Image: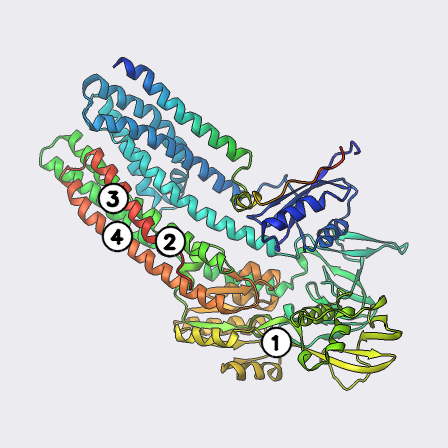
Amino acid sequence: MNGLAFLIPIALGLGLLGLAAFFWSLRKGQFDDLDGAALRIFVEDEEERAP
Amino acid sequence: MSATALVERDFAVPDIRCAGCIAKLEQGLVRDRRIAAARVNFTEKRVHLSCTPDTDMPDLIGAFSNLGFEAHPIGAGPDEIDPAAETSRELLRAVAVSGFAMMNIMLLSVSVWSGAAGATRDLFHWLSAAIALPTVSYAGRPFFRSAWRALRHGGTNMDVPISIGVLLVCAISLYETATSGPHAYFDGAVMLLFFLLCGRWLDSVMRDRARGGVTALLRNMGTGAMVVADDGRSRWVDATALEPGMVMLVAAGERLAADGVVVGGASRLDLSLLTGESAPQAVHADDLVHAGTLNLDAPLRVRVTAAGADTALADIARLMGEAAQGKSRYVRIADRAARFYAPAVHCLALMAFAGWMIAGAGWHQSLLIAAAVLIITCPCALGLAVPAAQIVAAGELMRAGVLVKDGSALERLAEVDRAFVDKTGTLTLGRPEAIGLERLDIGVRSLILALSQASRHPLSEALTRGLQSYDIRPADVTSIRETPGFGIEARWAGHAVTLGRPQGGDLGDALATELSVDGRAVATVRFADRLRPDAADAIRVLGREGVEAMILSGDRAEAVAPVARDLGLTAQTGMSPQDKLAAIGRQAAMGHKVLMIGDGLNDGPALAAGHASMAPGSASDVGKNAADCIFLGDRMMPVVQTVRMARRTQAVVRQNFMLAIGYNVVAVPLAFLGFVTPLVAAIAMSGSSLIVVGNALRLKRAIR
């Protein structure tokens, strides 16, 4: 019973963390271009440009 | 870099196809000093630019075309929030919240089911309640809103039993928790919401995706014209800012942005998008010209008489409004099912309650069983049955080059048994194609290619397109010069060569171009609007599928006859938009469901009136907006594939309904007898949902 006092808040906290991360990425537009994200790994880095 | 604020602009670029395009655009566009940042959205085929305020629209479009892309400006940017995209975002948030809550409540429930008792069980139930109640009040809002709307109008829909079920179950579970009872159904209520929200979200994602594709295709949005001011200088004006009285300069190869009267120049206009007529029409000063027509020959000065929303011929707009009303009467299959389902569910729950009361079980026990009946019959699988199948089908069709605007389009497409097809632009490609190129000498071909690729004139582009398939190198020509209304001239090995309008007048109104060397005609190339390469096959297969096709054309009988003969179809010619509408009305009165396939403005009302409708990607904006589906590319087979896919989807939806009913036949008696504990409810619910989704996935790879 004592273990529960730790374990349940930990379990809920981890879940909430995941939910918060999801909302954050949704707001930052991470899901706006799913097909593009898959293709971007093929895009070469931009050539060095003068600062 | 100046400190002035940057302006944000969005462009639809339909030709983004690969990672190379992304790199080319993002790295190429910023080389233009005035463009600070470019970001490609591959899914929606859009490019977002941040540029300095002094950048003109033609310059930006020019920056795209320098990289080899065609760009169409869209919307005014971030200040207008898309309501539909906002809805699906809200649904996604609700899915996330209910998914999180479901998993955590399940964690607690599993420990209760595996034997937690006494104070621990009560604690777990209270914790579940603490998670479930806020979740239900947040994630359940879409259902409560829709149910409330239905009830207020004296009707009922799928959301009414869902809302009643969820609220009732939550209330009873709370009571159970407070009285230290053994069963709380919080997990069931939240799981139900989760699965149903998944279905809703899939449905809205499908609509979003198709809408994004259609936006990318709508090229007239945000176009404009060069306007000549009184002092003779010209500047670019967006189509929305055009006003009557302005004088537009329309170059050869441009589409008119507004209705008007010709005040200078003479040319020929391609009216095929407007009337379906394939022969170009000659226009002179004082002739009335319409937005959307393509200027073929020479620059024109046009005084605007109507702009913006007024341009679409008022008649057609009115007809479309009337025609679309008929279609809105269609009731989607899920709603038809709900009409029987909702009352049945309520009756069953009520009977369970009454039955157990009569049997003397006490109101608490009776209510608990009634709630179990409600939650077990709640259309969890039913809510997924339709959207899951439709989104898989729409995804497959999108891969085959067909955009489906919404799920109800697939349902209606599955029912069609007649097809009315427009000729110009639908059965044919709707653009001039050079004919007889294979008869030309190779030297002549390479000379024509050298000249034609230097011009953006529609006929030159047709020549370039036609010649590129022969794998020839353009001849070495120098000092190329294009004279609008006449043609292209250049020097080649010491000779003066020209490519332009034929000098002899014996060609009538057919489109043709002539190559001459030192003033002597060497070759004449004619142009014609060709049939789509697989039109005959597509029509034949469509017939085999039980969909009888017929041509409805606004063109003259002489122009339609050869096409009709080639395809073996009957045709009605010279039809006005009203005539087309009437033809569909007659078929509908005879009990046929008509699939209308057309592209022009004149097809708009018919597309809106047809039981289902499709338009090619090259269609007019009105056509694309009115049609249920849009097929891209030159081939016509996608039409057949779509009809087949729609029928297969409908079959899967029906199977899914049968599965859901079969599940209820087993589960409802158990719930009636009071055997459904929260554990049984959870297993039954997730099991049936998984089966339904699995069945829908069979549609993947169904094309081929």
B1 horizontally vs B463: left or right: right
Q: Earlier in the sequence, mark 4 or mark 3?
A: 3
Vertical order, B290 against B234 (above or below): below
Amino acid type, label 4: Leu
Neighbour tally class for label 1: few under 14, some 14-19, many 20 plus, Cα within 10 Å: some
Q: Nearer the viewer, mark 3 or mark 2?
A: 2
> Callout 3 environment at 10 Å: few (<14), some (14 to 19), or many (20+)?
many
Position of B138 with respect to B496 (left or right) is left
Q: Mark 4 = which residue? A: B659
Query: What type is the residue that disc 3 sits on?
Result: Thr
For disc 4, the neighbor class at 10 Å (few under 14, some 14 to 19, many from 20) is many
Q: As shown in the figure, which amino acid type bears the numbered disc 2? A: Ala
Task: Give x and y (percent) for residue B286.
Answer: 80, 70
Observer-side mark, 3 or 1, equals 1
Q: Report the number of numbered marks.
A: 4
- Regarding residue B329, the answer to whether it shows in the image is no
Q: Which residue reaches farthest bottom?
A: B506
In the displayed image of the protein, which residue is found farthest to the top?
A2
Task: Decide which of tag 3 and tag 2 comes sooner along the chain.
Answer: 3
Q: Position of residue B507 (x, y in %)?
A: 75, 84
Q: Quadrant of residue B360?
A: top left
Label 1 vs 2, first from the N-terminus: 2
Which of the two labelled residues, at mark 1 and mark 4, occupies the earlier sequence position?
1
- Frontmost residue, B441 versus B190: B441
Q: Which residue is mark 2?
A: B389
Looking at the image, residue B282 lies above or below residue A21:
below
Residue B377 - label = 3
Question: Marks 3 and 1: CB-CB under 8 Å?
Answer: no
The residue labelled by disc 1 is B530
